[in-house]
Amino acid sequence: QVQLVESGGAVVRPGDSLRLSCTSSPGNSFTRKGMGWFRQSPGKQRELIAQISYLSSTTVADSVKDRFGIFRDNDKNIIFLQMHNLKVEDTAVYYCNTLDRRWPWGRGTQVTVVS
């Protein structure tokens, strides 16, 4: 069964940067799939914040525009979320998945921004 694995989360201060990574279990490449980064804060629904097509066309949500970027390394089957100027409201568990959300969700990676 396919497994998604997110990593890179940490406890940081406002204004800091982080890079999150996402990969999948061997034999389950997502290099030909559109992928997204999602996040979920306590009490809120999971939301799509950045997406990348298999041709690397990207879109980011207005809430993170100009601060977050998504990119991929298809040779290594990795999706990245580069986050700059983090804010307290960015605190959430971050997940990756296919854009149609059909793959099982991974455990996510926790990003906590504390002042």
Image (cartoon, rainbow, N blue to C red):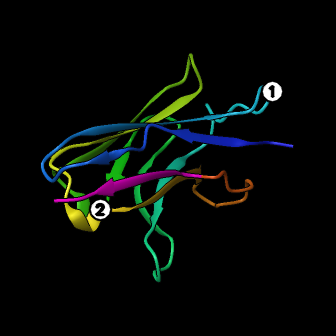
Q: Answer left or right for 31 relative to 17.
A: right
Q: Is residue 49 visible?
A: yes
* Residue at figure coordinates x 67%, y 43% from the top left: 4
Estimate the x, y position of residue 62 in percent, counting from the top left.
23, 66
Q: Residue furthest top?
A: 75
Examine the residues drawn in magenta and state their main secondary structure.
Answer: strand
At label 2, the amino acid type is: Asp
What residue is shown at x 57% (from left), y 56% (from top)? 99
User: Compared to 89, does 3 lie above or below?
Assistant: above
Marks 1/2: CA distance? 32 Å
Tag 1's secondary structure? Answer: loop
Residue 21 horizontal/vertical position (percent): 48, 35
Looking at the rendering, the stretch of residues picked out in magenta corresponds to: 108-115
Counting from the top left corner in percent of width and height, residue 67 is at 19, 49
Please tell me which of labels 1 and 2 falls first in the chain.
Answer: 1
Badge 2 is on which residue? 90
Instruction: Kindly identify which numbered label has been placed on residue 112.
Output: none
Say which amino acid is labelled 1.
Gly
- Relative to 26, does residue 30 appear above or below in the rendering? below
Q: Residue at horizontal 19%, vertical 44%? A: 84
Q: Quadrant of residue 80?
A: top left
Residue 27, numbered circle: 1
Residue at 34% from the left image edge and 62% from the top image edge: 91
- Whether residue 62 is visible here, answered yes or no, is no
Which numbered disc, 1 or 2, marks the residue closer to the eye? 2
Neighbourhood count class around disc 1 (C-alpha, 10 Å): few under 14, some 14–19, many 20 upward: few
